[in-house]
Image (cartoon, grey):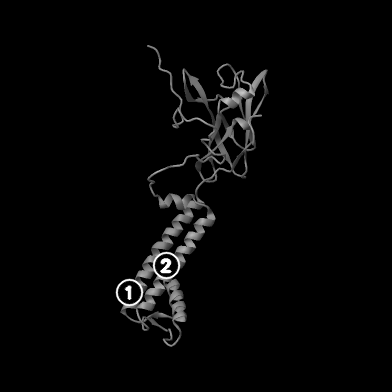
C-alpha cells in the first residue's frame, strides 16, 4: 500500500503571497484580526508592557478611592468622625480620599472613622473592594514576574557558506541571560511561493539541521542546514531566492532550570536577510 505523503503547513494557508512577514523579528505573529474579538483582560494584563501595567494599577487605585471619597461626601457632614465640618468642600474631599485609602488598604490610623450608619456601610464596601483588588493585584504581580521569558538573540542575517565540502545555510543564536538552559531544540521552517500549473501556492518545508538539539546552551549555537538536492536553496541564485518570496522561521524550545519550566523563542528572516 502506498504511503500517503505528509503535508507540511504552518496553519497559514497556501495562497498567501507578497513580501509579507508571518513571524516578526521578536517572535510575535504578524497577524491583524478584523471583526469581533474575544476580550481577555487577564491575558492583556499579563502580556502588556510593565509601564502600562503599573499605570493601570495605579490609575485604578486612585479612581476607586476617588469614587468612595465622593460617596463619603454625599453621605453628609457626619459621615466621617474627626473631620471639621467648617472646612471647605475640597479639604473635606481630601480627608475623605485619604480615609478611603486607609480603609482600602486596611491601614486605619484611627484619626478619622465612620460617623453614622451610611458611613459604616460605605467603609465596609470600601474595605471589601480593597481586599479583592489587592488580592487580584498580588496575583497579577506574581503571574507576570514568574512567567518565564527567553532572552535569546539571533544573528541579524543568515549566511550561505562552504561547509564540509558543500554549502550550507547558517545562522547563530545566543543566550543573553546568565541562566541554565538545557535540552534546547531547534526547528527551522522555510515558506516560499511555488507555481503549480497556473496557480501560485505557498509551500512549507522543514529544513534538516546538522544538529537539531543540544544538551547545554551555555554559549552560542550555530544552526547549520546543509544544502543538498532536497533543499529549497539548492542551485538557487540570489535573484531566484528573491522571487520565491521566502521566509525562514526559526523556533527554539528548551528547559529553563531557574523557572523550572519550558521556554520558547522564535524569529524569522526574509530574502533580504540572506547574505
Q: Nearer the viewer, mark 1 or mark 2?
A: 2
Q: In this view, does 163 lie above or below 41?
A: above
Q: Quadrant of the C terminus?
A: top right
Q: Residue 214 carries which label?
A: none
Which residue occupies the foreground of this view, 248 or 196?
196
Q: Position of residue 239 (x, y in %)?
A: 62, 24
Q: Which image quadrant for residue 85? A: bottom left
Residue shown at 51% from the left, 44% from the top: 260
Which residue occupies the foreground of this view, 206 or 203?
203
Q: Position of residue 24 (x, y in %)?
A: 54, 39
Q: In this view, does 232 lie above or below 184?
A: above
Residue shown at 62% from the left, 32% from the top: 272
* Residue at far bottom of view: 86
Q: Is residue 176 above or below residue 275?
A: below
Which residue occupies the foreground of this view, 101 or 219?
101
Q: In which quarter of the image is the N terminus?
A: top left
Q: Name the residue under label 2.
A: 64
Q: Mark 1 points at which residue?
A: 121
* Residue at far top of view: 1
Within 10 Å of the Cα at label 1, are there few (<14), some (14-19), or many (20+) other Cα atoms? few
Mark pair 1, 2: CA separation: 16 Å
* Residue at far front of view: 198
Which residue occupies the foreground of this view, 118 or 135?
118
Within 10 Å of the Cα at label 2, are there few (<14), some (14-19), or many (20+) other Cα atoms? some
Q: Which image quadrant for residue 76? A: bottom left
User: Which of disc 2 and disc 1 is earlier in sequence?
Assistant: 2
Whether residue 224 can be seen here: yes
Mark 1, secondary structure of its residue: helix
Mark 2, secondary structure of its residue: helix
Amino acid at each position: 500500500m502506498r504511503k500517503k505523503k505528509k503535508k507540511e503547513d504552518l496553519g497559514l494557508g497556501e495562497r498567501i503571497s507578497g513580501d509579507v512577514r508571518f513571524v516578526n523579528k521578536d517572535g510575535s505573529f504578524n497577524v491583524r484580526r478584523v471583526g469581533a474579538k474575544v476580550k481577555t483582560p487577564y491575558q492583556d494584563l499579563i502580556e502588556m508592557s510593565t509601564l502600562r501595567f503599573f499605570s493601570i494599577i495605579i490609575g485604578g487605585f486612585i479612581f476607586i478611592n476617588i469614587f468612595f471619597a465622593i460617596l463619603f461626601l454625599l453621605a453628609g457632614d457626619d459621615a466621617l468622625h474627626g473631620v471639621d465640618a467648617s472646612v471647605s468642600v475640597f479639604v473635606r474631599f481630601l480627608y475623605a480620599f485619604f480615609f478611603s485609602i486607609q480603609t482600602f488598604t486596611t491601614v486605619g490610623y484611627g484619626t478619622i472613622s465612620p460617623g453614622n450608619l451610611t458611613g459604616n456601610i460605605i467603609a465596609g464596601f470600601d474595605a471589601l473592594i480593597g481586599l479583592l483588588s489587592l488580592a487580584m493585584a498580588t496575583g497579577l504581580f506574581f503571574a507576570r514576574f514568574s512567567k518565564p521569558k527567553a532572552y535569546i538573540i539571533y544573528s541579524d542575517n543568515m549566511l550561505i557558506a562552504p561547509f564540509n565540502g558543500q554549502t550550507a545555510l547558517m545562522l547563530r543564536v545566543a543566550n543573553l541571560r546568565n541562566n541554565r538552559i538545557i535540552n534546547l531544540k531547534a526547528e527551522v521552517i522555510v515558506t516560499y511561493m511555488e507555481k503549480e500549473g497556473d496557480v501560485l501556492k505557498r509551500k512549507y518545508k522543514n529544513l534538516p539541521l546538522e544538529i537539531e538539539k543540544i544538551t547545554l546552551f551555555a554559549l552560542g549555537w550555530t544552526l547549520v542546514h546543509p544544502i543538498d538536492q532536497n533543499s529549497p536553496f539548492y542551485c538557487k541564485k540570489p535573484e531566484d531566492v528573491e522571487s520565491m518570496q521566502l521566509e525562514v522561521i526559526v523556533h527554539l524550545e528548551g528547559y529553563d532550570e531557574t523557572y523550572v519550566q519550558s521556554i520558547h523563542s522564535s524569529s524569522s528572516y526574509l530574502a533580504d536577510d540572506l547574505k
